[in-house]
Image: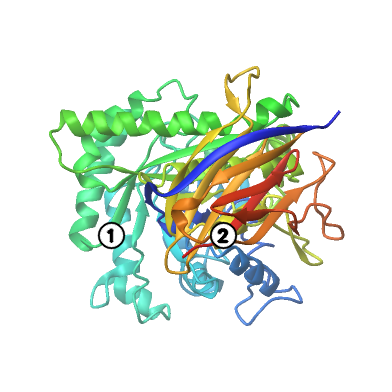
């Protein structure tokens, strides 16, 4: 039986959490599966441009308006030899790629990515190999990318056709170095020492770069949060960010519990902030460490079959891996996760939806056909488009529920973003209730004469519906019925729905 629940909210222009750094709408391109080959790059495809990049993919990435893209991994980076991926294509060697048991042809490398990232109006977040390599290779790569010329590696770049430096600003010091699966996995002491020495050397080459110290691979790691405390005790003064990674899933097919998993992300962020602030206090430092949540998403649909494929298949070029077909309920969870990142806009200054194309991705392609938007495309697109400005806390009273792993889960998850330049405030809200409408009443009187621009809803009667090349049952719609009257917003949030309520403010 469906009915209606009520939620009472106050939204005030002074309830500021912090400025939204647009880089929280970042994403990730790894040499994994068909993300690069068959996604970004497919010279024999009818949609390929003069550089071999798929134009249909470029258009979809532009729709998402992604300001920063992490590259080239991921687990891939921990045994990556960047020199193999530059220079004349015919001279580039094929290599055994250990993380995903794949043949890497190096047809696509740093130069190609730098060109592509410009075409999608983005910038590079470069990850370096601190698994099988170290300080000197990181320095050589930085010299190749950012030094103008007149040195061994900057002149090599120029000989490779790039006269101007790439000027990569953001650098990740390794990837998931706490994980036993990582090639070159390290103890916190080993990693902390290597990372700080690498950071110091890199800053001598280019003091303008920003550096990300490697945090835990997820909140369930046995070494969390000691990893953060120990590694930061070495790197704190030398870096600007600590990274966080976490993936979520519904392997047990328990939707109310799945929809509550953003509470786990919230708890993880709060614990990392506390740990950073503890190290800050111990070091008597004046600096506040920011967070780069540079891998997050739903990932579970393909895990078991991929493990089997990797164990049992021969070395192959660009096999289909991690191609999770995202359901409607996955999109709701991604919406809750985006709201959670925005709720921490004061400390989470970068984040990457992992990944961008084909591999646990909002954008899918057919090697022999077109490209399409998965369900999770929409909450990301909406927040990226309308979630720039100042994040505002919503004061909310609504029903709560308990699940296997969580207690007091609010039926409504919400945050707002005020864009003063555009004279708009946007409320993002998920109704987690699977049966009932939520009738939302919200005091918006602090914004003066506010009026409703539009109420966009992503809803679907089938929680397991997926989009494909030929059908998109999950797509947003503008709905009628909401209104703002005498400083009060009223809107109905349908059962199991993602909502974007845009107001014009004075
Ligand atoms: O995004 C897929 C993989 O997940 C990345 O390579 C790795 O960093 C993480 O474990």
Where is residue 146? Give x, y as percent.
31, 69
Is residue 329 visible in the rendered image? The answer is yes
| Ligand 1 location (quadrant) | top right
Structural distance between the alpha carbons of marks 1 and 2: 38 Å
Is residue 434 visible in the rendered image? The answer is no
Where is residue 202? Give x, y as percent.
24, 56
Dot 2 beta carbon under 8 Å from ligand 1: no
- Left or right: residue 197 compared with residue 244: left
Q: Identify the element where label 1 is drawn.
A: loop
Sooner in the amino-acid sequence: mark 1 or mark 2? 1
Disc 1: CA contacts within 10 A as few (<14), some (14-19) or many (>=20) = some
Residue at the image point whose x is 70% and y is 43% from the top: 493
Q: Identify the element where label 2 is drawn.
A: strand
Identify the residue position indicated by label 1 in the image: 209
Where is residue 452? Give x, y as percent.
62, 60
Disc 2: CA contacts within 10 A as few (<14), some (14-19) or many (>=20) = many
Residue at the image point whose x is 69% and y is 40% from the top: 439
Identify the residue position indicated by label 2 in the image: 503
Where is residue 357? Give x, y as percent.
64, 57
Looking at the image, is 375 positioned above or below residue 22?
above
């Amino acid at each position: 039986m469906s009915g209606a629940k009520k939620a009472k909210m106050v939204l005030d222009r002074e309830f500021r959490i912090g400025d939204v750094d647009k880089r929280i709408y970042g994403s990730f391109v790894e040499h994994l599966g068909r993300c690069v080959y068959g996604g970004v790059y497919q010279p024999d495809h009818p949609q390929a441009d003069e550089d071999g990049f798929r134009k249909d993919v470029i258009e979809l990435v532009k729709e998402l308006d992604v300001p920063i893209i992490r590259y080239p991994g991921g687990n891939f980076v921990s045994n990556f030899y960047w020199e193999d991926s530059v220079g004349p294509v015919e001279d580039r060697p094929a290599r055994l790629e250990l993380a995903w048991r794949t043949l890497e042809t190096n047809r696509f490398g740093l130069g190609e990515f730098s060109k592509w990232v410009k075409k999608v109006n983005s910038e590079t977040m470069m990850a370096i190999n601190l698994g099988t390599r170290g300080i000197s290779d990181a320095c050589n790569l930085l010299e190749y990318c950012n030094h103008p010329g007149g040195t061994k590696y900057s002149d090599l770049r120029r000989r490779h056709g790039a006269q101007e430096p790439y000027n990569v600003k953001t650098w990740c010091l390794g990837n998931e170095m706490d994980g036993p699966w990582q090639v070159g996995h390290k103890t916190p002491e080993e990693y902390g020492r290597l990372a700080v020495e690498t950071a110091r050397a890199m800053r001598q080459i280019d003091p303008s770069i920003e550096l990300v110290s490697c945090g835990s691979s997820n909140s369930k790691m046995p070494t969390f949060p000691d990893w953060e405390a120990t590694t930061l005790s070495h790197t704190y003064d030398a870096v600007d960010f600590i990274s966080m990674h976490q993936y979520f899933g519904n392997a047990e097919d328990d939707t109310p519990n799945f929809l509550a998993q953003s509470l786990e992300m919230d708890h993880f962020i709060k614990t990392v902030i506390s740990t950073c602030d503890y190290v800050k206090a111990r070091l008597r430092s004046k600096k506040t460490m920011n967070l780069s949540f540079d891998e997050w998403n739903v990932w579970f649909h393909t895990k078991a079959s991929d493990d089997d494929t990797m164990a049992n298949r021969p070395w192959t070029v660009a096999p289909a891996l991690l191609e999770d077909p995202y359901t409607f309920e996955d999109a709701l969870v991604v919406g809750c996760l985006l709201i959670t990142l925005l709720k921490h806009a004061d400390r989470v200054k970068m984040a990457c939806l992992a990944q961008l194309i084909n591999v646990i991705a909002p954008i899918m392609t057919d090697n022999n056909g077109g490209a399409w938007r998965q369900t999770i495309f929409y909450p990301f697109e909406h927040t990226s488009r309308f979630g720039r400005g100042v994040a505002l806390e919503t004061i909310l009273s609504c029903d709560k529920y308990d699940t296997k792993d969580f207690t007091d889960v609010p039926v409504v998850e919400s945050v707002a973003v005020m864009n003063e330049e555009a004279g708009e405030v946007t409320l993002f809200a998920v109704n987690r209730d699977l049966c009932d409408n939520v009738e939302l009443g919200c005091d918006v009187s602090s914004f003066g004469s506010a009026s409703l621009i539009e109420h966009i809803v992503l809803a679907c009667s089938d929680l397991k519906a997926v989009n494909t090349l030929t059908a998109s049952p999950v797509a947003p719609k503008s709905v009628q019925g909401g209104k703002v009257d005498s400083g009060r917003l009223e809107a109905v949030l349908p059962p199991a729905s993602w909502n974007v309520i845009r107001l014009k403010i004075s």
